[in-house]
Amino acid sequence: MRIGIQAWGSEGDIRPCLALGAALSRAGHDVSAVVTDLGGREYEGYATELGIQIRTVARPSANRHEQLDRLSERLIRLSPFAQGKLITRELFAPAVPEMFQAARELCAEFDLVIGHYYQHPLRTAAEASDVPAVTVTISPNIIVSRSYPPTGVPALGPRWNQIWWHVAYRLVNRAFLPDVNKLRVEAGLPAIHTMREVWHSRLLDLVAVSPALFPAETDWDPRHKVCGFFEWPMSPQDRHLPEAVEEFLCAGDPPVFFGFGSLSPNQPLARRQLLNLFSEAVERLGCRAIFQGLAPGMETTGHILHVGRANHARLFPRCKVIVHHGGAGTTHSAIRAGVPSVIVPHVSDQSAWGAILHRRGVASKPIRRAKLSVRALVERVHRATDSEMRKRSENLAGQMAHENGACKAAAFVNALLK
């Protein structure tokens, strides 16, 4: 079959969708992906490696890194709901016209389309074209359940959780449905009444989460299929760490990893502030450390190694603790490595991951980015070195060892196509 994929967001949003595309290609499908990366990353170079076609639309402006840094400073001080409004207004809405045109082209050419759950233009184009559409949900915190509340409100039991979800969706619908319905009307479709039908396909919603970490709830709609995380296929050059990293790891005790992925600051002053905070924490801890994304190139300064990009699957198992932002990909990599986490969430889905890992006993209590301090970071890293937390992390890693989320998701897609 001919399958089109559309993704929007940061690297942590786009890479799982492309990994799914690679699994579908291996299953014999003709796959083409359209991506819109907030940081302006290029993915076309991975097309041959993944066995799919890739093109980029709605490229960011030249000053996007500066814009993202300013936006990040605002986001970390807002509630999850306010964060969603700001992200939609500042980052998603400006790209909608180009993404919608690309979505219409996909629907004209392909037999089935698959989209990141935020990609409502694709769902609108698919419905208008009578093409089946599947969604990919990367974080389960937006799927309604009596078992947990929406992110940002206290867990007070099933009855209160239902009330919280009702209130949350009233707010969400009021904030986001007008733009969704405006596009639907332009496409000749009737208005809809809840964002639940926007974010999750009525046919199939592929939940890219490990069932060992977050199994499907009994009250979920059956369209939600927990598959496991969609891991990026490992290329031959990924099978070994760079020589400088290998030498550093072999030269002493396992280090503590520090990195905020795509949310690492880009502006010099913000980078320097975070670098100083991490460095002081390392001095107080008396440990070796690897810092990612805070210095150009790869360099070693005493007991600290600076790296740019890093293969988490190879690096994390050799670390003592992983300090990270709680993105879905980094979170799953840390768990699969069997290493405890210290999560510093910046936005709502990361807060959800921080809470999930803390409840499972494989991470310290999360520290909101706006509240991050040397003292809090040192205390959380100390807690994460507890031997019992390490054992729980290793046990969970064992449960996840044989998962292949992308292949399982491809099997669900194949079943839908029969």
Image: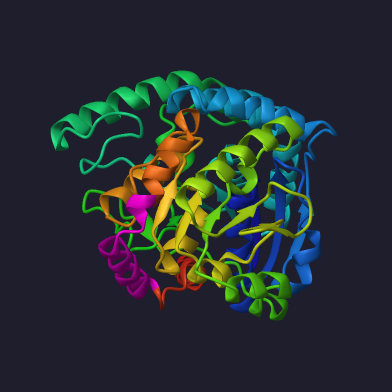
Q: Which residue is found at the position 80% from the left and 40% from the top?
A: 59
Left or right, 350 with respect to 185, comes to left
Q: Main secondary structure of the magenta part?
A: helix
| Residue 221 picture location, percent across and down | 30, 50
Which residues are the magenta region?
382-400
Q: Nearer the viewer, residue 209 or 364?
A: 364
Look at the image and tell me whether residue 135 can be seen.
yes
> Which quarter shows the N terminus?
bottom right
Q: Which residue is found at the position 41% from the left and 54% from the top?
A: 341
Left or right, 315 with respect to 108, comes to left
Q: Which image quadrant is residue 399 in?
A: bottom left
Look at the image and tell me whether residue 97 can be seen.
no
| Residue 350 picture location, percent across and down | 46, 42
Q: Is residue 165 magenta?
A: no
Left or right, 208 with respect to 363, comes to right
Q: Which residue is found at the position 48% from the left and 20% from the top?
A: 175
| Residue 208 picture location, percent across and down | 46, 58
Above or below 171: residue 325: below
